[in-house]
Image: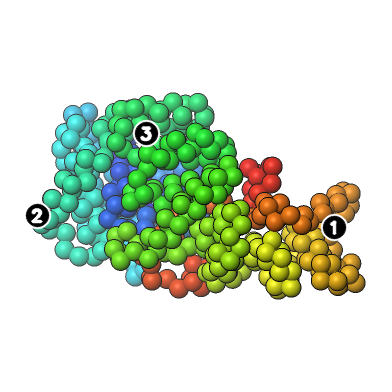
């Protein structure tokens, strides 16, 4: 987890630079294959412990926030500038076993800040990996190779002002300006894509996500969100390409390109195959998703829907009952179970299935009948909407049990922008 660098200068107009240095470090360390906690997850962890984003906090509190976000190391620092020269200082705090690195320092002109930060990030990389930080020639070559991907100071400032803005128009304006100033930098397009994706404006989101290369730190999430947008636009063929591409990277022989096998990716690929009436392919993906996350009821629901669409009601009962046991309060599962039992002639059992929650009954809500048409059934399949970046660790470093968690999913209905 990287905290914003403290501004120990007397120049208030440089306050934005603290977040900017954190973002540069996030990008640079992410390029080197480290799993770096995102700014959004850091803010969420701060909120959980009751601290504002602007708080200056102690080392002990940093550890508390890092533990909340399941981070093992903390990067923090400060900068001092007179408007012409700038000195950057940073340290790494290890949480287990506890340990604090020496202070790493880089200095230079304000105009040369990007290069200074590049050199500092290489020192931090050595400290995070607890190896010699003598910066050999190979490190210098590595820094030069990736520096072309980093922004100018003007683009960085616009970017930071965009992500810090609370007004949507200001955010969009500043991020678009950053993208204009540095067209080759993919961080502004990713953030713009995220804003439009949250609004379910997929046409705009897809335009911006297309500017994020798959091999960049934000690439996997951009590819995932691309696939979700294609599903929301009912373009199953393009959705298959997006999610299959992520799964192919789980099989890559290149450790730098390899991704873990993620249940939400498998689930969404299954939804895409289901839309294309490829029942066996869809079932295989949902079964793999349930292996990766056995406690997510929506994967079991989708497996049951696939069996129903394939005219195999007997095979649908077990996964649907599993889903109902995992989440008895889900009012969408009961009607599926009851309809399946009726198809099998088990009317007495079907009549005993609650067709909604107590709240639904009290409000007079009557569940919609379960469609028999395979295409209509496919539209009931639940899409995983959220990509969990915290799981972007090298494949093989964690067992499926260690990566089990609840995904944020939403049934593909007309109001599918609401989420669960």
- Looking at the rendered structure, the secondary structure element under dot 3 is helix
- At horizontal 44% and vertical 26% (from top left) the residue drawn is 173
The answer to which image quadrant residue 291 occupies is: bottom right
Q: Position of residue 332 (x, y in %)?
A: 75, 57
- At horizontal 21% and vertical 37% (from top left) the residue drawn is 113
Residue for badge 1: 358
Q: Where is residue 401 in the image (x, y as percent from the top left)?
A: 51, 73
Seen in the picture, residue 404 relative to 408 is either above or below; the reply is below
Question: Could you tell me if the residues under marks 1 and 3 are in contact, i.e. CB atoms within 8 Å?
Answer: no
Front-most of 4 and 292?
Answer: 292
In the rendered structure, find residue 393 and report the number of the disc placed on it: none
- Looking at the rendered structure, the secondary structure element under dot 2 is helix
Cα–Cα gap, marks 1 and 3: 48 Å
Residue 80 in view in this figure: yes
Seen in the picture, residue 203 relative to 263 is either above or below; the reply is above
Front-most of 416 and 54?
Answer: 416
Q: Position of residue 92 (x, y in %)?
A: 29, 57
Residue for badge 3: 159
Mark found first going from the N terminus, 1 or 3: 3
Q: Is residue 246 left or right of residue 25?
A: right
Cα–Cα gap, marks 1 and 2: 68 Å
The answer to which image quadrant residue 343 occupies is: bottom right
Seen in the picture, residue 229 relative to 153 is either above or below; the reply is below
Q: Is residue 326 left or right of residue 58?
A: right
- Looking at the rendered structure, the secondary structure element under dot 1 is helix
Residue for badge 2: 137
């Amino acid at each position: 987890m990287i905290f914003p660098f403290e501004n120990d200068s007397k120049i208030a107009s440089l306050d934005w630079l603290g977040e900017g240095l954190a973002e540069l470090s996030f990008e640079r360390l992410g390029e080197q294959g480290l799993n770096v906690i995102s700014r959004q997850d850091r803010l969420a962890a701060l909120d959980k412990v009751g601290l504002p984003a602007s708080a200056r906090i102690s080392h002990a509190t940093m550890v508390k926030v890092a533990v909340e976000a399941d981070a093992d190391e903390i990067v923090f620092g400060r900068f001092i500038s007179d408007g012409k020269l700038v000195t950057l200082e940073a340290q790494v705090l290890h949480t287990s076993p506890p340990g604090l690195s020496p202070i790493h320092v880089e200095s230079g002109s304000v105009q040369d800040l990007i290069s200074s930060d590049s050199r500092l990030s290489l020192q931090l990389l050595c400290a995070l990996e607890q190896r010699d930080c003598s910066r050999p020639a190979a490190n210098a070559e590595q820094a030069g190779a990736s520096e072309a991907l980093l922004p100018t100071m003007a683009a960085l400032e616009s970017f930071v002002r965009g992500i810090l803005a609370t007004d949507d128009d200001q955010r969009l304006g500043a991020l678009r300006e950053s993208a204009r100033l540095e067209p080759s930098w993919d961080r502004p397009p990713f953030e713009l894509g995220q804003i439009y994706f949250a609004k379910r404006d997929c046409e705009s989101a897809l335009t911006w996500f297309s500017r994020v290369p798959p091999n960049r730190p934000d690439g996997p999430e951009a590819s995932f969100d691309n696939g979700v947008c294609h599903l929301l636009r009912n373009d199953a063929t393009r959705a298959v390409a997006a999610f299959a591409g992520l799964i192919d990277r789980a099989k890559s022989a290149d450790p730098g390109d390899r991704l873990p096998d993620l249940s939400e990716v498998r689930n969404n690929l299954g939804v895409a195959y289901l839309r294309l009436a490829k029942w066996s392919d869809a079932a295989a993906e949902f079964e793999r998703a349930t292996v990766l996350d056995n406690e997510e009821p929506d994967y079991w629901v989708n497996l049951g829907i696939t069996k129903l669409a394939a005219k195999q009601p007997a095979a649908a009962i077990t996964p649907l009952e599993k889903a109902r046991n995992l989440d008895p309060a889900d009012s969408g599962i009961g009607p599926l179970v009851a309809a399946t039992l009726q198809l099998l002639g088990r009317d007495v059992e079907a009549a005993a299935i609650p067709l909604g929650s107590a709240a639904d009954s009290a409000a007079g809500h009557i569940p919609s009948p379960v469609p028999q048409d395979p295409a209509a059934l496919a539209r009931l399949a639940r899409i995983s909407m959220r990509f969990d970046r915290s799981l972007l660790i090298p494949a093989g470093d964690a067992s499926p049990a260690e990566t089990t968690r609840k995904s944020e999913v939403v049934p593909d209905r007309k109001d599918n922008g609401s989420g669960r």
